[in-house]
Image: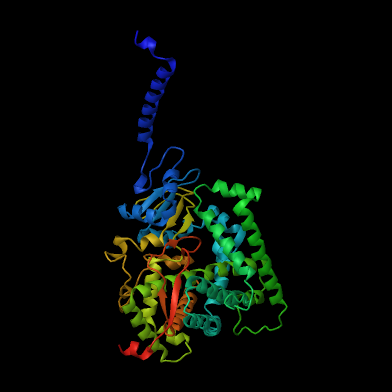
Amino acid sequence: MAISHLSFASIALLFLSFSIVLLLRGIKHLIRIPDHGPPTYPFLGCLISFYKNKHRLLDWYTQMLAHSPTQTIIVRRFGAPRTIITANPDNVEYILKTKFDNFPKGGPFIEILKDLLGRGIFNVDGELWHTQRKLVSHEFTTRSLREFLVKILEVEANERLLPILESACVKAEPLDLQDLFKRFAFDTICNVALGFDPGCLNPSLPASDLANAFDVASEISAKRAAAPIFAVWKAKRAMRMGSEKRLKEAIEIVHGLVVEIIHRKKLENDKEEENKDLLSRLIMGGHDEEVIRDMVISFVMAGRDTTSAALTWFFWLLACHREIENEVLKEVMIASKGDERLDYGSLKDMRLLDACLCETMRLYPPVPWDSKHAADVDMLPDGTHVNKGDRVTYFPYGMGRMESVWGKDRLEFRPQRWLGSTVKISPYKFPVFQGGPRVCLGKEMAFIQMKYVAASVIRRVEIRPVGHDLPVFVPLLTAHMDGGFKVMVGKRSSLMSNING
């Protein structure tokens, strides 16, 4: 009788509740946590975990890697091949050197940047990469290009950067040091790579269309790479809508302006190789215009934000460690012998400054991660199985925070770890400039630029952050400090007392 009084709806509700409980119990057994990676669900992969942690991806990956016995995790993404992420130096050496041919950039990665970089050296594999690498490696090892860079730095630093900083001293107003370094780096790389001065540091000139277009193109391209579902941006690109429409417009500006610069260069009569920019050297070599365009755009992309990002974090870390700042100042003054003009020889003698920059990039690498794609089945040294087509990512940001790699003081800013006659840090422990056949050709030029700027600034002014909040490290194609780096600038007081004290 009691049952007969129950409504049909009540019975249906009880049945549905019972069914849901059984379903959840069944799915629970299907949820996997593969190799200390994020929880993985049927069909969805790690999409739920990804969205929960999208605001802290770097630290999320770092935590999972730290808990993995091999410092390697596997991430299964919705509608995509597996991603293997590693902070294991043996794996990094295997990927970048030992089995280099089995870990090219691969089609999926190349597609992300193809619209912007085309067939430039950083976005190709195989024979085309070998040809460009051979060509550019010759140009980058010439003494004349290095001397040309130092002359550009001298003008940019002494006639533009330092006057802006000294003006800020007088005005006693905060400025965004990150933005200033980005402008400086863009002026410098455009002069070196294109022989073109965008004048980003010149307040009398309008904002550079080329710089603005590069900003938009690099940011949207980076978001492509970080997207959990590639089909979304591909669909937007096909329909030319939203961010993909803006990307298309920005790339058209970049390509158009660079081609215009190439045509202008070809009309110049001066064929002297001495003190020539990279573009002039490529034109003199008789290379195809589209290849030249893609190559110089690649070098502008590589050089515009990497050095500025490293310098931004370098000055923040020095401001947090005043005793190290004083030691660096002492070294700079002794190495330069008090001379206003810095040269290659004096920069080379600044070993503590070099160590501080390396330590900065260990903690805050300009490129926090880089990916390859497996051409065939393989096995990493730590025993991780690799399927054909897997995305294999090595993770400099996480590596700098691994106790197994750097010890218990891994989170401390300690430049001394780079000093000493017997100290030689493996590039696979510190893969900020990659390693193996693709090791960064511009590494020496990057250090020249960073050391020149750091030495010029530190001996003239004092940099002090505004506020006490810890800055946030944000990864795009290159990482940056969220919201900029607001600082107050003061005159460097009593240089000699700093040296003697």
Image quarter of the C terminus:
bottom left
Residue at figure coordinates x 41%, y 39% from the top left? 41
437 or 107: which is nearer to us? 107
Whether residue 41 is visible: yes
Residue 382 visible in the snapshot: no
Observer-nearest residue: 247 or 300? 247
Q: Is residue 96 left or right of residue 381?
A: right
In terms of depth relative to the viewer, which is nearer, 108 or 96? 108
What's the colour scheme? rainbow
Q: Residue furthest left?
A: 408
Location of residue 281 in the rendering, given as x and y in whole percent from the top left corner:
62, 77
Residue depicted at x 63% and y 61%: 250
Residue under the point 69% across and 76% down: 265
Name the residue at the right extreme. Answer: 267
Spot occupied by residue 165 in the image (x, y as percentages of width and height) = 49, 80
The mark tally for this picture is: 0
Q: State the residue lying farthest toward the top.
A: 1
Left or right relative to 5: residue 170: right
**Would you identify the image quadrant in which residue 457 lies?**
bottom left
Q: Is residue 123 left or right of residue 418?
A: right
Quadrant of the drawing holding the N terminus:
top left
Which quadrant would residue 492 be assigned to in this image? bottom left
**Picture layout, residue 407 above or below residue 488:** above
Which residue is nearer to you in this view: 339 or 193? 339
Q: Position of residue 159 (x, y in %)?
A: 55, 85
* Quadrant of the image occupied by residue 490: bottom left
Residue at screen point 43% across, 45% down: 76
